Image: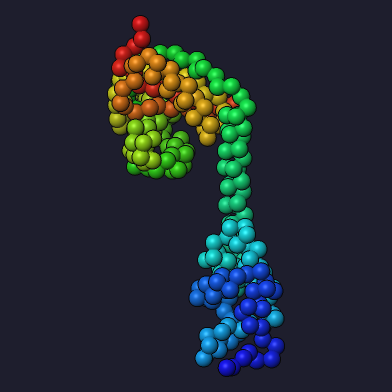
Amino acid sequence: MLTGMPGTIPIGEFAKMTHLTVKALRHYHRLGLLEPTRVDPYTGLRFYEPGQVVPARTIRRLRELDMPLADIKALLTAPRPADRDRVLLSHLDRLESELDRTRVAIDGLRRLLEEPAAEAVVRYRTVPATPAVGMTRHVVRTEVGAFCQEAFVTLPDDGTGPLTALFPEELFTEGEGEVTVFRPVTRLTATLVVPAAELAVAVHRGRYEDLDETYGPLGAHVADLGLAIPGPLREIYLDPHLDVAERRTEVCWPLSRHPR
């Protein structure tokens, strides 16, 4: 049986040195991410050289930071330092976004566990058919924020009313659906007319990621009334320009009639 050349390291020993499993090393070889110096033509045994230990450890560290393998390959093969730095900075931006989402989830869970559930302060509102300018798009739940932000920037504003979103039931039940974002208009030419509605309204204060803290009590209130009907829920963004902690959002639940 043939063995490695002097100075080469069998894959098992290389795994010990780098803390990468043999399975991972074989996978990285297939991807062209970390190719062995030599493969025994009879046994298929892979051999590495000492100079590959640092690149292998770098790959392991980057994987611990959840960097995709394609990005790791792009980083390791970058022809210029600027190209390498671009890949790293892009991944760091993703990590920071994930950390922000994690912090939001932790804060919300802590409030849920530590603070007693508050009853919603609910008002009732009869909304007439409303001329508006708007955008409609089929989106999944994770795309709603970006779509609303796009509409906030894109839709003209004649000062008639705040940005509002209509969310169909299937967005909540199936995770995707046709979302309409609009601004009411009186001085601009309308591109749609939003149907009239009877609504139960509660005000949410704070981050959009925490809107479920208002949806829950409001939905429970409407259920107690026995007036819930199928139809889109509305979110009215009263002051999206403020700091996230100061923002007010009206959550509007459709009713079959105005409570008397």
The C terminus is located in which quarter? top left
Q: Residue furthest top?
A: 260
Q: Which part of the image, by quadrant, shows the N terminus?
A: bottom right
State the image quarter where residue 241 is shown: top right
Q: Tell me residue 167's x, y (percent).
A: 37, 32
Residue drawn at (30%, 17%) of the image = 256
Where, by quadrant of the figure, is residue 104 drawn? top right
Please report the residue visible at 59 percent of the width from the left and 43 percent of the height from the top.
102
Task: Say which residue appears at 39% left-offset and 43% top-offset.
Answer: 140
Along the viewing direction, whichever of 54 and 199 lies nearer the viewer: 54
Towards the viewer: 198 or 172: 172
Rendered residue at 61%/24% (across/down) = 115
Left-right relation of 110 to 153: right
Q: Is residue 172 left or right of residue 250?
A: left
Q: In x, y percent, where is residue 224?
A: 40, 16
Q: How is the image coloured?
A: rainbow
Q: Is residue 48 left or right of residue 241?
A: right
Q: Is residue 167 visible?
A: yes
Q: How many marks?
A: 0
Compared to residue 131, the image places residue 103 above or below, namely: below
* Spot occupied by residue 156 in the image (x, y as percentages of width and height): 41, 33
Q: Position of residue 71 (x, y in %)?
A: 55, 64
Can residue 179 be seen here? The reply is no
Furthest toward the bottom, the residue is: 1
Between 89 and 150, the one nearer to me in the picture? 89
Image quadrant in which you'd find residue 139: top left
* Depicted 47 relative to depicted 139: above or below: below
In this view, the residue farthest toward the front is 1
